[in-house]
Image: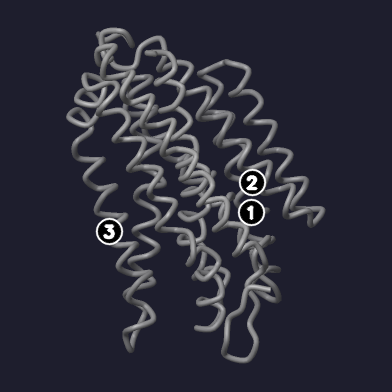
Amino acid sequence: MIELWFVIIAFLWTGYFVLEGFDFGVGLLAPLVSRNPGEQRQSLQTIGPVWDGNEVWLITAVGAMFAAFPAWYAGVFSSFYLPVTLVLVGLIVRGVGLEWRGKVNDPRWCDLGIVVGSALPAFLWGAVFADLLFDSVPAALLGGAFSLAVCALHGAVFLALKTTGPVRRRARVVAMAASGVAVPVAVAALSGLGTFPALAAMAALAAATALIWRRREGWAFTATAGAIVLSTLAVFMELRLRPFPGLTLAEAASGPYTLTMLSWIGLITLPFVLVYQGWTYWVFRKRVRVEGTVLTHG
């Protein structure tokens, strides 16, 4: 049960980083690929139907940590109280910006809030997990730079995949530029892990660069998503041995009864969550087009 729930928590964090990764990237890059209010709306509409649902993965991952590994939860979220608080502030500011920008006369402050609210979590989650692994300020900064660069690349590829016209063309250019930063930073950040998933993540990012150059946005997005999955896998392979300094996985876990009850709850609820999210992405799978002053998925 202990190993099972560690795998479930790793899966939940992986889903969060993959899905929120392109959310953060789009929030960061929307002003860069947009030249007028219509294009800004087009860019943000790519994540409009899904961004709040993607945050559910974070809530579920943290809730599972609290229930299955309370000592691990307590150690991580007390030691990293300030950065986690800043993450929450960023998510709130971003949410307010996304919800209010269509309801105010001047959306520039909302757009600024979206950029800041996307950059903070994108950087800080990488810094937190790198510090958790290496207990070093330089490692934390490098980890933050890695996660921020990968989110920017992931978001740029997603914009190229989900838009048409000038925004799509600019997104491809930005994706090429972002890959020029993400790949070397990934080499520096992941080489310290030295595991096969870390090496494969570097290769996936390099493949994404080639694919976006060839205008294969769908495969490029698969490659950036794969790089995030592999990077997260490499991190959790290390955390399995030592989830927190001075604490083993068995010492951090709840009792057998609690883990058994959680397993039944997860068996019932998790499939519904996965089916619902899959259905949402299927419904909004088409590109966001501008038809006059109206945005459509088609």
Q: Nearer the viewer, residue 103 or 246?
A: 103
The residue shown at (35%, 41%) is 124
In the rendered image, which residue does mark 1 sit on?
Answer: 177
In the rendered image, which residue does mark 2 sit on?
Answer: 180
| Residue 36 in the image: above or below residue 138 | below
Q: Label 3 to label 2, Cα distance in Å?
A: 31 Å
In the rendered image, which residue does mark 3 sit on?
Answer: 92
Q: Nearer the viewer, residue 152 or 233?
A: 233
The residue shown at (25%, 41%) is 84
Q: 2 left or right of 168?
A: left
Q: Earlier in the sequence, mark 3 or mark 1?
A: 3
Q: Residues within 10 Å of mark 2 (few under 14, many from 20)?
A: some
**Residue 237: x %, y % from top left:** 48, 17
Find out whether the residues at labels 3 and 2 contact each other: C-beta distance under 8 Å. no
**Residue 35: x %, y % from top left:** 56, 79
Find out whether the residues at labels 1 and 2 contact each other: C-beta distance under 8 Å. yes
What is the secondary structure assignment of the residue under circle 2?
helix
Q: Amino acid at mark 2?
A: Gly
**Residue 281: x %, y % from top left:** 58, 57
The residue shown at (36%, 31%) is 265
Q: Residue 296 appears in which quarter of the rendering?
A: bottom right
The residue shown at (68%, 41%) is 223
Q: Amino acid at mark 3?
A: Ile
